[in-house]
Image (cartoon, rainbow, N blue to C red):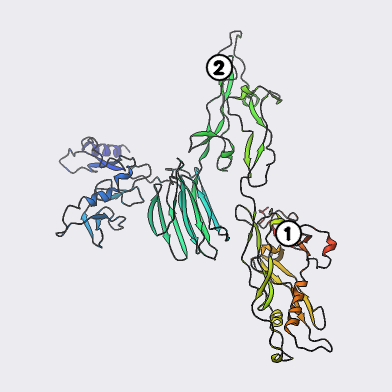
Amino acid sequence: SSRTARSEEDRDSLWDAWGSWSECSRTCGGGASYSLRRCLSSKTCEGRNIRYRTCSNVDCPPEAGDFRAQQCSAHNDVKYQGQLYEWLPVSNDPDNPCSLKCQARGTALVVELAPKVLDGTRCYTESLDMCISGLCQIVGCDHQLGSAVKEDNCGVCNGDGSTCRLVRGQYKSQLSPSKLDDTVVAIPYGSRQVRLVLKGPDHLYLETKTLQGVKSENSLSTTGSFLVENSSIDFQKFPDKEILRMSGPLTADFTIKIHYAGAADSSVQFIFYQPIIHRWRETDFFPCSASCGGGYQLTSAECFDLRSNRVVADQYCHYYPENIKPKPKLQECNLDPCPASDGYKQIMPYDLYHPLPRWESTPWTACSSSCGGGIQSRSVSCVEEDIQGHISPVEEWKCMYTPKMPVVQPCNIFDCPKWLAQEWSPCTVTCGQGLRYRVVLCIDHRGMHTGGCSPKTKPHIKEECVVPTPCYKPKEKLPVEAKLPWYKQAQELEEGTAVSEEPSFIPEAWSTCSVTCGVGSQVRLVKCQVLLSFSQSVADLPIDECEGPKPVSQRACYSGPCSGEAAEHTPEETQLLYGSLRELDELYDWEYEGFTECSESCGGGVQEAVVTCLNKQTREIADETLCVSSRRPPQLLKACSLDPCPPR
């Protein structure tokens, strides 16, 4: 080891001292500076005679422009092959990123105007690596040459990713005749690596709001890269999808919206890193508990808003699971003896010290409204705890060293659930008068299917429809053996539907005709069912969980002419026969109203539907005896708690 140290010392002794650092190659945006040394030996010295470091690592003003573009534009007044051109930079050359290649505006002409760009030029547009003496040198986020330190997903150099959180989700459009657009997602100031993909016929557009409250809108009408509130945006528009990227950090609050443009549904997948703007901050030590003779003092933690640089209520920091409130620190203070004391007062250990007075609150009252915005309140008082743990109220001024907790706060500020009616199904007949159906769902503010909508305002789910095709033929042209067209349509067999992992309507077999001759009726059960993949069992669901028109559960049937009757029908008879379908639709009927609690907490359970007798016009609950003419619906079971149970 001594020989090695001596050889390194001999090698360095052949060099003169390093000279002073040169002026920086750039005044902003990151440049390079060099220092030289001279070889004092007549022989060749080992090592390099030049070293580099980064400098001017401050952002350039927006009007400064791109450094590589400035070098290209310097050749605008120099003729190339006898002609002047306006030169634009060609960036991200994979073969030689440190040569100055430029393209003549409006042409395909690309020329290498210099073998090397100036020191400090970025090798690639999305990298801190810089060109020095024509070679690309690695630069870390700490702006040091040769450093491999990188930013985390939150944009913090050599960070651990704890200052932001990954947000990902999916939006599905809810078509409504009264709505032309809807909000997909709100992306706050400072977010990074934003990516949205829309699939469908609709279009994305942006609304922004700066920290100063300035609002603007961008329609995203064409493909391209552009700036919105100084945030770079890359937008691609295809016939059946749109892709929006923003590297960030965003310099304003962005609201991504969707404009409905077609009858088909669209979906939007989004992902971005959202900064945690509310973080715990440790306070200074509070005043000492004693003025002399030895006391103690504590620190606390307060929730700090990084955007507004002010202290806010603790609930904002509790919103982020990543935030862990620091524990208070304790230290001794005022150890000088009191004038009337001959010695030091004993300092109690941490677990027995006399705590400072503190604010204490009762639980929040129930919200005054379940949705649409309400208020809740609580009482807050200043209390003190003695050594034995007894708590007693004291004057409020003793707690004023910390802000008093709020006594009123808004709650349930989201919109109330609303009925959402889907499109009508085709008419159930191919001629004459029939019925058509639609799905009506109760949708909450997140677009999820839920309960809580008023039954009185529920849109009707079926209505009569008329197909302008006659349901009869002239009497003289109707053979005795022929069946009426409407009857043939009603008697068509339906293909069996297999239960799948998507909720679907599963009709059972038709009952026998209620009469042995003439026109009667048939009924069948139509269930909404789903296949539970983890247990390979079939579960019944509420009818409104299935999408699309529900297959009819009643129909007329014809069992041939009764004894002594002719098999011919006049138009009046045909209409009379068809009228039997409407007579089956009674004023009172059974309906499902909610579910019992789930039978299991995990691994798959069931909920049983509650059946009530309803007046179909007023939607009011009626006595069950009024529904005796209708067949009581079967017991329905709804799958619930589908997440697998944790291993024991």
604, 88: nearer the viewer: 88
Neighbourhood count class around disc 1 (C-alpha, 10 Å): few under 14, some 14–19, many 20 upward: many
Q: Quadrant of residue 349?
A: top right
Q: Nearer the viewer, residue 220 or 11?
A: 220
Lateral position of residue 593 relative to residue 125, left or right:
right
Q: Residue at label 1?
A: 606
Residue to which mark 2 is pinned? 334
Name the side, left or right, on which 147 lies relative to 432: left
Hey, what amino acid is under mark 2? Asn
Residue type, numbered disc 1: Val
Q: Which residue is farthest right? A: 625
Q: Position of residue 273 (x, y in %)?
A: 49, 49
Q: Position of residue 101 (x, y in %)?
A: 25, 56
Residue 330 spot, x, y in % from top left: 57, 26
Residue occupying the point 80% across, 83% down: 518
- Residue shown at 62% from the left, 26% from the top: 350
Q: Is residue 543 above or below residue 157?
A: below
x 54%, y 25%: residue: 285
- Count neighbours of disc 2 (C-alpha within 10 A) and say few if under 14, some if 14 to 19, many if 20 or more: some
User: In terms of secondary structure, where does tag 2 sit?
Assistant: loop
Frontmost residue, 322 versus 428? 428
Quick check: marks 1 and 2 in contact, CB under 8 Å?
no
Q: In the figure, 466 relative to 257: above or below?
A: below
For residue 142, what is the image quadrant? top left
Quarter of the rendering occupied by the N terminus: top left
Res 536 seen here: no
